[in-house]
């Protein structure tokens, strides 16, 4: 990457501050110029000297320190930043930014920058779930700030829940995307994304489903939003929180997902079918629980509607992107789906490969276009895969 790219990393006073050193090191190794701004609280967790040694730049802490150069320092850094990432971002600094408070070097520089601002929250799970904090986060998302959502895990306070700083690799990927992307290249486009599994009820306590987590579809919807497009997400049941500021429609069964898509199809530009839709459903739903017996039970199934196939029959100007999750004959099966369903692109992954399954945060994909050209991509985050899919759509259709 060109050394003309500049990233400002803001480090705030959370226990995860030490992880920012790894992030700075990774970016510098990519020949990216990195400047670090620390809050006074952050210096209690990690020394500015650590960041100066890694970045080869002076670390800024005190807004009232005598400047070493003639520029007004916070303005110089704000104008210099192609991307400004606050890692970790405490509830305190997020509250300040959301409400226009600029009382230290970090918040002052954020307010002055025209670069893309990325926030990676890290805090106690109760703080993360606080309604005031959620409103601040929602406000920032609506204003175009990018949020790298925290992970679930054991926190420094000893509790377990959401609030752990996202994996540094994911934060790095997010920064790199916004260094390279035309920030509004999907402006004016409406993209309908399906995600997650469907559930097909057998009786009041049993159903047929699959292992899809919904993560890939959710990341695609968020990527569309981050690149200026309008994303509509139709999702089956997942354990994921609804993406902030994205229209999200919840369904359960394949028929419900089909109906939702058909109602929306006439007002979209692109359809990306990342959901793992059940191919079959029980012929009959038993209103009472089926009692266990010594005899075998025969469960009769009927085909569900094929959303991609139906869209492909009369797709008009819609760009149609499908997924092929296979365990064998990956490329052959994907090519067959392109022809059968009249797809423009298909994303194929072998879910039996380590790192490419449903529930993880990574994927390994092949993207095949209608002309049967194949591009292979190595193991990477699903966030990164989402942007690659959007890149391939742009390239193939000259959007």
Image (cartoon, rainbow, N blue to C red):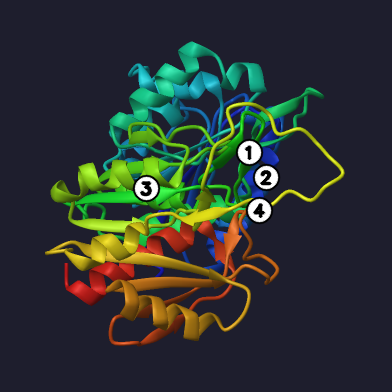
- Residue receiving disc 4: 22
Residue pictured at 56% horizontal, 57% vertical: 56
- Separation of residues labelled 1 and 4 (CA atoms): 13 Å
The x, y position of residue 145, in whole percent, is 35, 36
- Residue receiving disc 1: 165
- Residue receiving disc 2: 19
Seen from this angle, which residue lies furthest front? 295
Callout in the foreground (1, 4): 1
- Residue receiving disc 3: 221
- Separation of residues labelled 1 and 2 (CA atoms): 9 Å
Label 4: how many Cα within 10 Å (few below 14, some 14–19, many 20+): some
- Report which quarter residue 186 is drawn in: bottom left
The x, y position of residue 293, in whole percent, is 83, 39
Is residue 396 shown left or right of residue 49?
Answer: left
Between 348 and 24, the one nearer to me in the picture: 348
- Separation of residues labelled 3 and 4 (CA atoms): 29 Å
């Amino acid at each position: 990457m060109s050394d003309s790219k500049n990233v400002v990393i803001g480090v705030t006073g959370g226990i995860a501050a030490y992880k920012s050193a790894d992030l700075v090191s990774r970016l510098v190794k990519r020949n990216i110029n990195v400047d670090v701004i620390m809050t006074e609280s952050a210096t209690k967790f990690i020394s500015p000297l650590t960041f100066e040694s890694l970045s080869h730049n002076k670390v800024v802490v005190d807004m009232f320190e005598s400047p070493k150069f003639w520029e007004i320092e916070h303005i110089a850094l704000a104008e210099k930043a192609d991307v400004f990432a606050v890692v970790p971002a405490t509830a305190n600094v997020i509250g300040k930014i959301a409400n226009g408070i600029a009382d230290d070097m970090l918040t002052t520089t954020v307010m002055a920058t025209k670069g893309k601002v990325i926030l990676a929250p890290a805090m106690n799970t109760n703080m993360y779930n606080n309604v005031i904090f959620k409103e601040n986060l929602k406000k920032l998302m609506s204003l175009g700030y990018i949020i790298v959502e925290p992970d679930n895990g054991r926190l420094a306070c000893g509790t377990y829940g959401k609030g752990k700083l996202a994996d540094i690799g994911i934060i790095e990927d997010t920064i790199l995307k916004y260094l390279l992307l035309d920030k509004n290249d999907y402006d004016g486009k409406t993209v309908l994304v399906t995600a997650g599994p469907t559930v097909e009820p057998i009786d009041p306590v049993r159903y047929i489903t699959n292992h899809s987590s919904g993560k890939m579809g959710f990341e695609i919807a968020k990527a569309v939003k981050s690149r200026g497009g309008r994303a509509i997400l139709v999702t089956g049941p997942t354990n994921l929180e609804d993406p902030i500021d994205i229209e999200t429609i919840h369904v359960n069964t394949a028929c419900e997902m089909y109906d939702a898509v058909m109602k929306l199809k006439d007002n979209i530009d692109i359809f990306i079918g990342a959901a793992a839709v059940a191919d079959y459903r029980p012929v009959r739903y038993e209103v009472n629980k089926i009692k266990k017996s010594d005899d075998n039970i025969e469960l009769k199934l009927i085909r569900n509607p094929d959303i991609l196939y139906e869209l492909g029959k009369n797709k008009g100007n819609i760009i149609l992107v499908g997924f092929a999750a296979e365990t064998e004959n990956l490329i052959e099966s994907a090519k067959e789906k392109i022809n059968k369903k009249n797809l423009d692109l298909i994303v194929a992954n072998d879910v039996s490969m380590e790192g490419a399954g449903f529930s993880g945060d990574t994927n390994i994909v092949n993207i095949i276009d209608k002309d049967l050209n194949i591009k292979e991509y190595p193991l990477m985050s699903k966030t990164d895969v989402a942007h690659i899919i959007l890149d391939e759509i742009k390239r193939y259709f000259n959007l």
